[in-house]
Amino acid sequence: MAGCCPVDISLGNWEDEGARHAIAYIRDLTGRKKFEESLRHQATHDELTGLPNRWLFHLQLDQAVVRAGRSGLRVAVLFLDLDYFKTVNDSFGHATGDALLVQVGTRMRSILRENDTLARLGGDEFAVLLTDLADVDEAVSVATKLLTSLQASYRLQDQDVYSGGSLGLAFYPDDAQDSDTLLRYADLAMYQAKQAGRGAYACYSQEMDRRVHEDMQLHTRLKEAIAQGILKLHYQPQVDVESGAVVGAEALLRWHDPVLGDVSPSRIIPIAEATGLILPLSDWVLETACEQIAAWAQAGTPLRVAVNFSAQQFRQRNLPEKVRAALERTGAQAQWLGIEITESVAMTQPEQAREQLNALVALGCSVALDDFGTGYSSLAYLKALPVSKLKIDQSFMKGIPHDANDVAISRAIIALAHSLGLTLVAEGVETDAQLAFLRQYGCETYQGWLFAKAMEPGDLTEQHLANQTCLSELDFEFELAQ
């Protein structure tokens, strides 16, 4: 009712010379009530975004599970973790990171129904509660829309910054019967989505529980392998398309564990990134590759070696200094060290990437953009980066020459590289037809099983020397013919 307000009334009475008196004390409680409401809101909502917090999300999830048990409908929990959020914080500061979180909350809220719950659980983690679902596909559709909306750039400090997210889903009653387990399973599914390459979603399965235990064992043994020096680098030759000469090699991680057997890099790297082992592992790879560069140079068979730099490694402000120190310790010359980063790493923080790469190029290193065509490169940013080489991702080579889309994409990448004055390396070349395609359209270099798998340094040295001898004989025969 208009004009009403909460009050506290106290009544008192007394007698004085036979007369009865009464007094009422009336106190306006509006301020107190507002303060209490503010405290309740602070206890149940995130201060930064204004979204429900973890406690309120749990409460509403508990209630939703009870209602779903009566109605027979599904409940879905979506657990989202931002990709590259630490990168934004480290590069631009926490104030900018907070601004990103607010924008993320606003975008997600705009996608959801009014009765859907969106909460910030803490840090860069968000959760969504979807109720009254007839089937799983409804939640998957929402997950896809959320991820698509988050992939668009954010305008922060007058720059376009990319983040995106990885998302996991779990369902009542399909996966779990209580809120704690549902949230844990959704978190587990999110972790699997992030391991699969970020920017994607995954639905919980029982297989994920088994995978978690395997990952824990893998983490323990990887830590021991790094400490004990069990890991190795093998080198896959990079070959000139026209002459067949070995012109370089990519350093690739190899690990044979006495218990687990051969463990592929696709298993090693995600575990290392998730557990903090990626930095010591990256340092070891850089040092070992530089030692091999120096050894080949001293033997009179210098060869350029490409080393993949991880996202966390690339974020280190002192990375150029670490590279310089590794070159000095090993005696390797910078001109023989190639730096490879994926386009997603380069485009996440284009300004920082440009600064880092300029510093590495100033040392004498060359820079290649790996897995080109699989991310969201801006051509304007690409042109501004001190990149001398593009690598065509092997996913595009698989369909050549039969898949029209792969042919068109690869031709476009080759044409783009030529227009920017960049050289090209095609990955995953396995057939003569693929090599003929590269030769026809002017791709300069390739690597893949058509020529050789990754091999130990000694084997590559022998092949490199044999290759040089063969080329020298061809040159000699050509001169005689002239």
Image: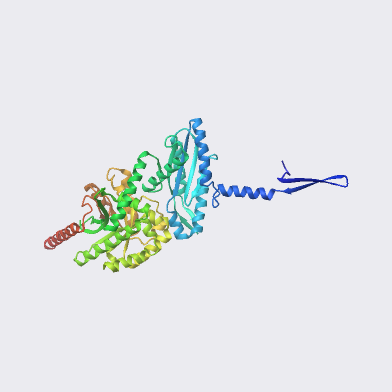
Q: Nearer the viewer, residue 400 or 398?
A: 398
Instruction: Name the image colouring.
Output: rainbow
Q: How many marks?
A: 0
Residue at figure coordinates x 51%, y 34% from the top left: 66
Specify the farthest residue to the right. Answer: 17
Q: Is residue 474 left or right of residue 180?
A: left
Q: Which of the 4 image quadrants contains residue 384? A: bottom left
Q: Which of the 4 image quadrants contains residue 456? A: bottom left
Q: Is residue 403 left or right of residue 154?
A: left
- Residue 393 visible in the shown view: no
- Quadrant, the N terminus: top right
The percent position of residue 261, horizontal first and vertical second, equals: 24, 48
Q: Is residue 421 left or right of residue 108?
A: left
The percent position of residue 465, horizontal first and vertical second, equals: 16, 60
Give above or below for 460 relative to 9: below
Q: Nearer the viewer, residue 356 or 20?
A: 20
- Residue 17 visible in the shown view: yes
Give above or below for 466 relative to 324: above
The percent position of residue 160, horizontal first and vertical second, equals: 46, 56
Q: Nearer the viewer, residue 423 or 317?
A: 317
The percent position of residue 161, horizontal first and vertical second, equals: 46, 55
- Quadrant, the C terminus: bottom left
Give above or below for 319 relative to 411: below
